[in-house]
Image: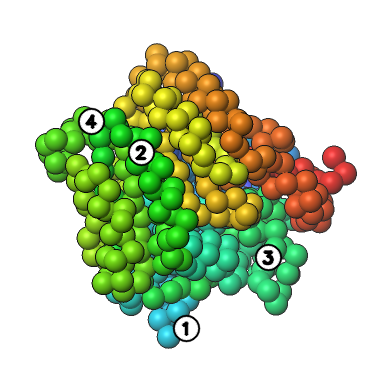
Amino acid sequence: MTTALDTHDLKSRFGGKLLHPEDQGYDTARKVFNAMIDRRPGLIAQCTSPEDVVLVVNFARERRLLLSVRCAGHNVAGFAVCDEGVVVDLSLMKHIAVNAAARTVRVEAGTTWGEVTDALQPYGLAATGGYVSVTGVSGLTLGGGLGWLARKHGLAIDNLLSAEVVLADGRQVNASAAENEDLYWALRGGGGNFGIVTSFTFQAHPAGIVLGGIVVHPFAIATSLLRHWRDFEETAPEELTEGAMLFHFGNDPAVPAPLRGVKVVAAGGVYAGATEEGEKVLAPLRAFGPPVADLFQPMPYSAAQRQADFLWPPGLLNYWKSCFLETLSDAAIRVIADFFSRVPSANTVVPEAATAFVNRRYPFNFLVTSAWSDAADTEKNILWTRQFFEAMGPFAAKASYVNYIGDEGVEGVRAAYGDEKFARLAAMKTKFDPTNLFRMNQNVTPAFR
């Protein structure tokens, strides 16, 4: 049984809500996106201001307690919660301020990308983050920030103008190109290793109506469609960020009858430019087959960012594996199709994204998001995922996207950053968090450890 922490001294000054194991709302607050994570913190501190965050950081540091940081709780490794220690819960901090004239948006750390997109849409603007709307701004940004505008406007980190941060010693600082530049560098991809970001300010971009959607084909032609999509992607303009996916359609009445419950292969994305030009660009992709369903249409960017939400519903048990690919060869495509033909769960999705990141020279990102509802199926789903990932080994680069990997230890983190950047991040860790207070993450340890 988890023991509640003594918070008498903290309670009188804390502006938010402190949840102990016996309190109403505790069990809801400790749940995260991945249902495989079942941790019981000694305290969940639901903050409402940066000053609350400072109080909790000092409380945990002075008592040498394990500390984790929860924003949207979407990370598959479940680092947002810890056993016995303290959770700094930022999910109530959701203020968003749009400066339409400057095309900037300041968001607090508890917001999701869907909330940010909704706030920007009335101004015909969008920020570059998130393939799905429920992803948290904080985790996605600190790990890099792939999304539907990546090819045209870069990643979330490329558009981060400044951040307000609470450091391990309790100080509040700003990080930008003009202030605490080394911290600013480390935050843009280094994860939550260096402090707790309480707010972000991003550059936004015009993106009112976009051309978004997917073309859906029977799984039987998966190898042909993936080859066609790969060749199409080689000449796609920067206005188009796209990907290919293998998944099962659900039995929702909104799904066209021929597709309900069916295993399919699809290609799609978002064209952030003039609709007429997008129609021309996408014509070769949409004509192939022809598809069982062509779901491309003009839509607000806020709708486009939600178009893939149905593929990753909350409450399922999840196990993910990811890497970058040197190339998407015919042999790699055959492996993908072969393994997905034997997928053990109808909730598993295999996306291929044509975009770039820290390892920007690699043209494709490969991701297996295995998900299932029955705990009795855990072993077979994890085994299938690992075998699939091992079979892709000959085509994989020695690099991964930190936001997509699970708890893979120091070697997994080193692979995400590469030796040179990992060493530089370790030096920054030594400067800003020498005791490794912020270690519930894809952890970079201080250089002297």
Residue furthest to the bottom: 101
Who comes first in sequence, dot 1 or dot 4? 1
**Between marks 4 and 3, how big is the CA–CA gap?**
46 Å
Q: Relative to 8, does residue 195 appear above or below in the rendering?
A: below
Q: Nearer the viewer, residue 162 or 26?
A: 162
**Between marks 3 and 2, how big is the CA–CA gap?**
44 Å
Q: Position of residue 214 (x, y in %)?
A: 29, 50
The residue pinned by badge 3 equals 184
Q: Relative to 388, does residue 403 appear above or below in the rendering?
A: below
Kind of residue at badge 4: Val
Taking the image as shown, residue 103 lies to the left or right of residue 173, namely: left
Asked if the residue under mark 3 is in contact with the one under mark 4, i.e. CB atoms within 8 Å, the reply is: no
Who comes first in sequence, dot 1 or dot 2? 1
Residue at image position (35%, 55%) is 269
The answer to whether residue 17 shows anywhere in this view is no
Kind of residue at badge 2: Ser
The residue pinned by badge 1 equals 102
Element on which disc 1 rests: loop
Q: Relative to 291, does residue 39 appear above or below in the rendering?
A: above
Q: Write down the quadrant of residue 324 in the picture.
A: top right
**Between marks 1 and 4, how big is the CA–CA gap?**
46 Å
Kind of residue at badge 1: Ala
Q: Write down the quadrant of residue 449 in the picture.
A: top right
Q: Position of residue 374 (x, y in %)?
A: 35, 19
Who comes first in sequence, dot 3 or dot 1? 1
Q: Nearer the viewer, mark 1 or mark 2?
A: 2
The residue pinned by badge 2 equals 224
The residue pinned by badge 4 equals 262
**Between marks 4 and 2, how big is the CA–CA gap?**
18 Å
Asked if the residue under mark 2 is in contact with the one under mark 3, i.e. CB atoms within 8 Å, the reply is: no
Q: Position of residue 444 (x, y in %)?
A: 73, 44
